[in-house]
Amino acid sequence: MRYYLIGGDGKTYGPADGQTLQKWAREGRVNAGTILREEEGGAELRADLVPELAEVLQHLPHDAAPLAYPYRPCPNCGSLYDPASRVCPNCGAAGPAAPNGRLVTGNAVADGFLGFVVGFFSWFLYVVGAIALLILYFSIKRQYPAFARGILMGLFAFLVIMLGLFALCLAGMSHM
């Protein structure tokens, strides 16, 4: 039987016969968690369930290659499916949604709200703190000039760091 390989990049390779798959496994391109799709019928299964690969994979280190694609077994029929689709293509059962990352509160909406509150109040505290330090600077600069200069240098350094972090955030958002 021939199979298509779902690569770690999400692309499909093949079809490949058992000997080619064994060669790929020895090269580290296939591991037990690699997803394969049958050429006939299109059923998807993990590489360790393919008879031609089972023995080869037993003799390889478990971390020979990264998992190819985050497929999960359907809770209803057991066939593998992409959890981002939320529906098993084999039986049509709805599965759990694929997480887009870890959650702080366990709820994506609550995490979004919490992030907004923390972000809003963090900037608010930074601004209030900077204003308080500017008031302190102007009130003590004649009596304690060295201390006042230190406050001003600290504020300047804080401003440079915050602008740098803001620039990093913008750069990171442009790659999303």
Image (spheres, rainbow, N blue to C red):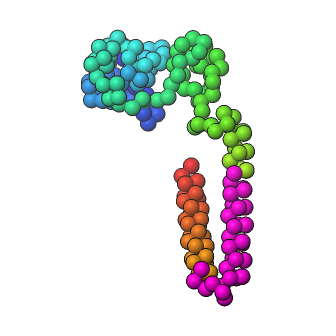
Visible residue check, residue 56: yes
| Figure check: 110 above or below 68 | below
Most foreground residue, 94 or 150 = 150
**Residue at figure coordinates x 39%, y 29% from the top left:** 13
Q: Is residue 30 above or below residue 125?
A: above
Q: Is residue 119 within the magenta segment?
A: yes
Closest to the observer, 149 or 131: 149
Residue 53 vs residue 126: left or right? left
Is any part of residue 3 visible from this angle? no
Is residue 25 positioned above or below 129 on the image? above
Q: Residue at x 71, y 61 (%)?
A: 125
Q: Nearer the viewer, residue 118 or 22?
A: 118
- Write down the region rendered in magenta: 118-147
Quarter residue 96 falls in: top right
Dominant SS of magenta comes to helix
- Residue in view at x 72 percent, y 39 percent: 110
Q: Would you say 143 lies left or right of 1 here? A: right
Expressed as whole percent of the image width and height from the top left, the position of residue 6 reads 43, 28
Residue at 31% from the left image edge and 19% from the top image edge? 57
Q: How many marks?
A: 0
Q: Position of residue 149 (x, y in %)?
A: 59, 81
Taking the view exactly as shown, the residue that stands out farthest to the bottom is 142
| Residue sitting nearer the eye, 27 or 156 | 156
Residue 145 in magenta?
yes
The N terminus, quarter of image: top left
Q: Position of residue 40 (x, y in %)?
A: 44, 14
> Does residue 148 appear left or right of residue 175 in this picture?
right
Query: Which quadrant would residue 27 be assigned to in this image?
Result: top left
